[in-house]
Image (tube, rainbow, N blue to C red):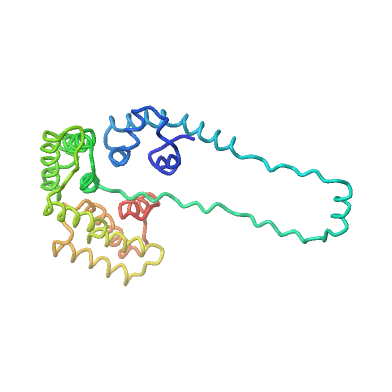
């Protein structure tokens, strides 16, 4: 089986990593640290892809061993007299109709999570846990790269928090040995936790979700109400140009205005799926 970032944890949960190379053991332990940034950093992607290639042959071996241990039931030899007795007493049992079972597959729903939220979540996840130098340096490297490439700008809503995280990681790395028990200052931890808890339920996301729910069931009255909500949210400062979802809210506003002008809601599947992905509703 080919390993991917999505199926790795499920596929490898029964694999005994004690027989794997040391590098594979370490990468497996730190998978959660790397996984969040698989699409953000080429070095991390390359490292994990190589790790997958190392692990895949062991999955095949484990599968073969599992098959080999399954023993077929021993057949009992019966005498003619036993067979004839069974034939006499045997009653016809109506066969049960085979019920076809359809695989109930759930589509992968991928929420579009901004890099700064990923960093904050990963940082919080380290709190109280034993971490390695590599884990600390990795997260610091992601922050440095984001600053250099301006993926997270100084005008970002959480730029100050990301800066504090970067400074704390740098200081920790200087002072720690090979490993340490990572601790986040209480005040910073509380603030960051609130940021993560609030993510996804911001006014911008709520407005986008309302529009998605209206799709296919829209009326002029409903469109007017939502359009007024968007305008009021902007006017009241609840939705500003610094919001990650600001452009999407503008997109929704445009769709509503066009609908009220023409009585036709012209939204392509690509546009709708884009809004769903941004709101964390999947496609």
Residue 260 coordinates in the image, percent (x, y):
31, 65
Relative to 116, is 11 on the left or the right?
A: right
Residue 162 coordinates in the image, percent (x, y):
14, 45
Residue occupying image coordinates x 27% and y 70%: 225
Q: Which of 275 and 52 is in front in this view?
A: 52
Q: Quadrant of residue 7?
A: top left
Q: Nearer the viewer, residue 100 or 225?
A: 100
Q: Quadrant of residue 39?
A: top left
Q: Which of 236 and 160 is in front in this view?
A: 160
Image position of 254 with respect to 66: above or below: below
Residue 91 coordinates in the image, percent (x, y):
82, 61
Q: Quadrant of residue 65?
A: top right
Residue occupying image coordinates x 23% and y 67%: 229
Q: Which of 48 and 199 is in front in this view?
A: 48
Image position of 155 with respect to 26: above or below: below
Relative to 141, is 107 on the left or the right?
A: right
Relative to 192, is 105 on the left or the right?
A: right
Residue 267 coordinates in the image, percent (x, y):
36, 55
Total tally of numbered discs in the picture? 0
């Amino acid at each position: 089986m080919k390993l991917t970032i999505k199926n790795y944890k499920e596929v490898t949960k029964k694999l005994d990593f004690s027989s794997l190379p040391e590098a594979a053991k370490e990468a497996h332990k730190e998978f959660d640290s790397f996984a969040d940034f698989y699409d953000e950093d080429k070095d991390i992607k390359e490292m994990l892809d190589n790790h997958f290639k190392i692990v895949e042959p062991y999955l095949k071996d484990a599968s073969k061993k599992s098959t080999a241990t399954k023993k077929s039931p021993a057949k009992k030899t019966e005498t003619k007299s036993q067979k004839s007795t069974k034939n006499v007493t045997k009653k016809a049992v109506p066969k049960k109709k085979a019920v076809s079972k359809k695989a109930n597959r759930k589509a992968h729903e991928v929420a579009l999570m901004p890099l700064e939220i990923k960093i904050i979540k990963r940082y919080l996840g380290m709190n109280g846990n034993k971490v390695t130098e590599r884990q600390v340096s990795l997260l610091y490297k992601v922050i440095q790269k984001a600053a250099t490439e301006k993926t997270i700008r100084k005008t970002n809503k959480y730029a100050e928090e990301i800066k504090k995280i970067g400074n704390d990681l740098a200081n920790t790395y200087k002072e720690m040995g090979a490993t340490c028990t990572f601790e986040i200052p209480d005040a910073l931890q509380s603030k960051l936790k609130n940021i993560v808890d609030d993510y996804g339920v911001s006014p911008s996301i709520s407005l986008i979700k309302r529009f998605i729910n209206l799709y296919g069931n829209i009326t002029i009255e409903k469109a007017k109400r939502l359009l007024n909500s968007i305008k009021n949210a902007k006017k009241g400062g609840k939705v500003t140009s610094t919001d990650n979802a600001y452009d999407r809210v503008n997109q929704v506003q445009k769709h509503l205005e066009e609908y009220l002008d023409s009585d036709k809601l012209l939204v392509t599947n690509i546009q709708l799926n884009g809004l769903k992905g941004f709101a964390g509703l999947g496609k």
